[in-house]
Amino acid sequence: MEKIRIGVDLGGSHVSIGAVNNQGTIIKQLEKDYTIEEKKDILNVAINYITYAIIELKKEFDFNSFGLGMAGIIKNGIIMRSPNIDGAKNFEIKKILEEKTNMSVNVENDAICAAIAEYKFGHIKDYNNIIFLTLGTGIGGNIIYNGKIREEEEYQELGHTIIKENGIKCKCGQNGCFERYGSILVFKKKVMERLNLPQNLDGPTLREHIRLNEDKIEDIKEEYINDIVLGLSILINRFNPDLIVLGGGFARYDYLFLDKIQNRLKENVPIKVAELGNDAGIIGASIL
């Protein structure tokens, strides 16, 4: 059997498990989108699916450990808090998964995982100071400073940077957090409501509806772009980066937004979409 690494990306809307080779390529992937009912118990649903997927992948590949990335503050394999996943507070996910799979498990913040993957296999090695954001169910973030990934808690909370005073209430308890305006989920929900589409619609079908009805959602796009620009401007003023990298689910919708975001951003900082796209979390988790 081929020697590979296994990475898990546990998100607020889906969980993906991938077998990754030494070149950073996912050679096999298993994934599950949660139903509306399953989202009420994400952690248990995800843990059961991860256990199933590990058993299946073990039949084909030789491995005795795996890595897992997920949103939130992670310490020693314990989810201290994760606002977008119910029940994820002081949750010993490493211990539970190790007992269920009989393997060693490394757990880390998903944005750190994605940043690790992009910096190792992507196109950002020529930059020293980078803001890396994953725009998905929420907004994860990390800073690469002087070529090193910062793992302090303050750099994992970029999605909870306040961009609008007295703004929308966030699950973290604050008002006006960046992720309440800039996550790709926020954009998708507004589009589905406008076009009267089911909230559990899959990505490819949603993108086709967007293509056919772009004129009907132009104001939603404009509002989203302006909110992204506002959030990025605040982070640029705080961290003074050489580059911004946007990943997560946003990478599948970047063609709608990226040029306009770059053109409206007054600060002259280049923006790139994560080269590894939405797979960066799996790849990074596999090399923890």
Image: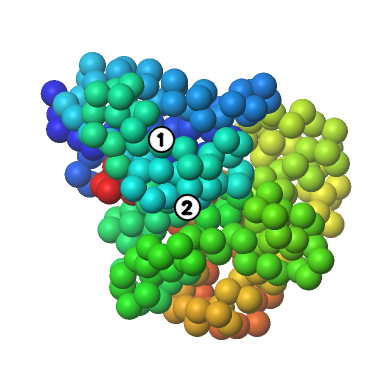
User: Which is more N-terminal, label 2 or label 1?
Assistant: 2
Residue 178 in the image, given as x and y percentages of width and height: 66, 62
Please, what is the three-letter code of the amino acid marked with disc 2?
Ile
Residue 55 in the image, given as x and y percentages of width and height: 30, 18
Question: What secondary structure is marked by label 1?
Answer: helix
Instruction: Give the answer, above or below, for where 3 lies relative to 121.
Output: above
Residue 54: name its quadrant.
top left
Q: Is residue 178 left or right of residue 132?
A: right
Q: Which disc number belongs to residue 73?
A: 2
Instruction: Give the answer, above or below, for where 123 lies relative to 278.
Output: below
Question: What secondary structure is marked by label 2?
Answer: strand
Q: Which residue is at a point 57% across and 35% down the rendered structure image?
A: 87
Q: Can residue 142 be seen here?
A: no
Q: Quadrant of the N terminus?
A: top left
Please, what is the three-letter code of the amino acid marked with disc 1?
Ile
Q: Is residue 98 left or right of residue 141?
A: left
Q: Which residue is at a point 61% across and 36% down the rendered structure image?
A: 86
Q: In this view, does 256 lie to the left or right of 45?
A: right
Relative to the observer, which residue lies in front, 165 or 182? 165
Q: Can residue 174 be seen here?
A: yes
Residue 271 in the image, given as x and y percentages of width and height: 52, 69
